[in-house]
Amino acid sequence: QLLLLDEPTAGLDPAGRDAMLGLLQQLARRHGKSLLLSTHLLGDVDRVCDHVLIVHRGAVRGAGPIGELREHFRGRYRLAWRGTGTAFLDGLRAAGVAIDDSGTDSANVGTPPAWQVRQFYEISARCQVTLRDVVPAEEDLEDLYHRVIETV
């Protein structure tokens, strides 16, 4: 009922890796097998597993459903605009938005709880800035891993 796999795709070419991951998905989903993967290839884990146990330097740093561990990342966006962004960024900060990384026409931001995307547009209109992109940030398992080991 439980398969323990240590680096199951190590040394495989891309086609072999895809075949192995497909087989693991079938074993888990169609045949009800539980898999325990030990691997540094986090993309493989993201593709095959629903739960994760993050171990760093011999200590468990995070555990649970991947979706729940990613919950912290929700509310993050990549913004791009046309116009002078200084007033726009100041307006975002005044509304409680954290500006993580900004340039002259783009920024990575984190929004407060209950934030509505339309608020980006309202603030940009007041500041005479045209928003070109409002893209929700997506955290892959590698980003999640780094966030978890840095914050614990």
Image: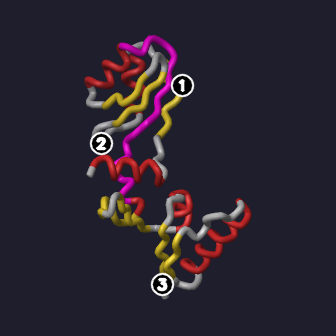
What residue type is disc 2 on? Ala
The one of 69 and 5 positioned closer to us in this rendering: 5
Residue 27 x/y as whole percent:
58, 80
Q: Nearer the viewer, mark 3 or mark 1?
A: 3
Tell me, yes or no, whether the two marked residues, 2 and 3, touch with CB atoms within 8 Å. Answer: no
Residue 30 x/y as whole percent:
59, 81
Tell me, yes or no, whether the two marked residues, 3 and 1, touch with CB atoms within 8 Å. Answer: no
Q: Nearer the viewer, mark 2 or mark 3?
A: 3
Q: Is residue 11 above or below residue 131?
A: below
Residue located beneath label 1 in the image: 132
**Helix, strand or loop for disc 1:** strand
Using residue 34 as the reference point, say whether residue 22 is left or right of it. right
Residue 114: image tag: 2
Q: How far is the residue under mark 2 from the one under mark 3?
A: 41 Å
What residue type is disc 3 on? Leu
**Helix, strand or loop for disc 3:** strand
Which residue occupies 61% across, 65% down?
10
The residue carrying pointer 2 sits among few (fewer than 14), some (14 to 19) or many (20 or more) residues within 10 Å by Cα, namely few
Residue located beneath label 3 in the image: 2
Q: Is residue 131 above or below residue 70?
A: above
Residue 60 x/y as whole percent:
31, 63
The disc, 1 or 2, on the residue closer to the chain's N-terminal end is 2
Q: Going by the picture, which residue comes out furthest to the bottom? A: 1
Residue 33 x/y as whole percent:
52, 83
Which residue occupies 41% across, 51% down?
144
